[in-house]
Amino acid sequence: MAATTAHKHPNYMAIFWYLAALTVTELAVIFMPLPKLTIGVLLVALALGKAAMVAMYFMHLRFETRTLGLIAVTPLVIATLLVFVVLPDGFAVDHQTAVKKPAAHAPAKH
Amino acid sequence: MTPAAASVHSAVEPAETPLTPESWGKLGMWIFLAGDAVGFGVLLASYGVMRATSLDWPIPFNVLGINLTAFMTFLLICSSVTMVKALEWLGKGDRIRCRWFLFFTALGGAIFVSLQAYEWSKLIREGLHINGNPWGASLFGTSFFIVTGFHGLHVTGGVIYLLSIIRYVTNRLDPAASYNAVEITGLYWHFVDLVWIMVFTFMYLL
């Protein structure tokens, strides 16, 4: 059986303070007089930064093999791809409805 | 190690996994979490698409409020710290402190779920329902309850898991015998924290 503690524990309290500071920054960002897109990009970047810190230091991914890291990142890639796959469909629904509307008044064919 | 002992040992764990040499259980948990993350990823991606293509989606933080959820986020981060502290103390051979920190982690999770129940009941009283709301797109309520509910179920499961692992640690006199089990529990708990970080950003702040 392998050793119980294969790596040194990182400074967890430092990670905690970083996470707390990033959360406060997130709350501050939504009240900043910035364009909506900039606020959105900043919030997503901050959230990804926090998630990465939890995965790297609390889940010890930093000390694991690269392959395990790839397994962990795959869901994020799939979710991002899904947005781009489904987004055009979402916009297409309105367009198709608008095109089909006049057909409702067409005379019935026998 | 004698050949007989080696044979018994290999019957328990036939070979080391190259990805997580500590235990197969850890690899199993990582694979489970990757699958679970796809589930949450699909929910959040669908939420994003629905919101982007809706003409009357309400501004979430105006409707939901963020003071309580900001505190809940802080609480979950604190519980992640108590979880890693539990593992750290177990690594040093202190089972008593490990059990206390595991208990604090479970307590943090239980408070989180209670606050979520309070938030849900408050929002339902204000008119946010799974099939409609006074502020705009009906899918706003649907997606809110499904995503936060799915996460809340994970936290509830995590609290039960943590309480079971306290008993597991109690029943093993050698701290090293329960180290892998506590580390695997920690992976699950931190994942729940990680998902909430994304849910908080996408469903409350954006």
Image (cartoon, grey):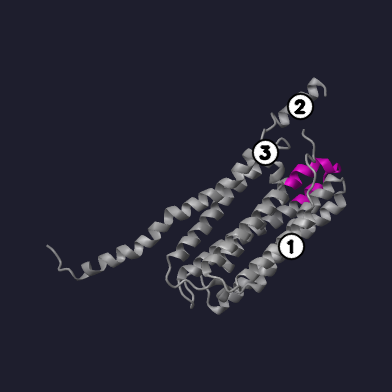
Looking at the picture, do discs 1 and 2 lie on one chain? yes
Residue A64 is marked as: none
Prevailing secondary structure class for the magenta stretch in the rendered image: helix
1 or 2: mark nearer the eye: 1
- Give me the chain letter of mark 3: A
Question: Is residue B79 left or right of A46 when viewed as pictured?
Answer: right
Residue B75 placement: quadrant = bottom right
Looking at the image, tell me whether mark 1 or mark 2 is earlier in sequence order: 2
Q: Secondary structure at mark 3?
A: loop
- The residue depicted at 73 percent of the width and 56 percent of the height is B80
Q: Position of residue B146 (x, y in %)?
A: 54, 63
Residue type, label 3: Thr
Residue type, label 1: Gly
Q: Which residue, given by chain and number where applicable, does mark 3 sit on? A: A65
- The residue depicted at 57 percent of the width and 78 percent of the height is B125
Residue type, label 2: Val
Residue B82 placement: quadrant = bottom right
Q: Position of residue A74 (x, y in %)?
A: 56, 46
Q: Residues within 10 Å of mark 3 (few under 14, many from 20)?
A: few
Q: Which residue, given by chain and number where applicable, does mark 1 sit on? A: B108
Q: CA distance from mark 2 to mark 3?
A: 28 Å
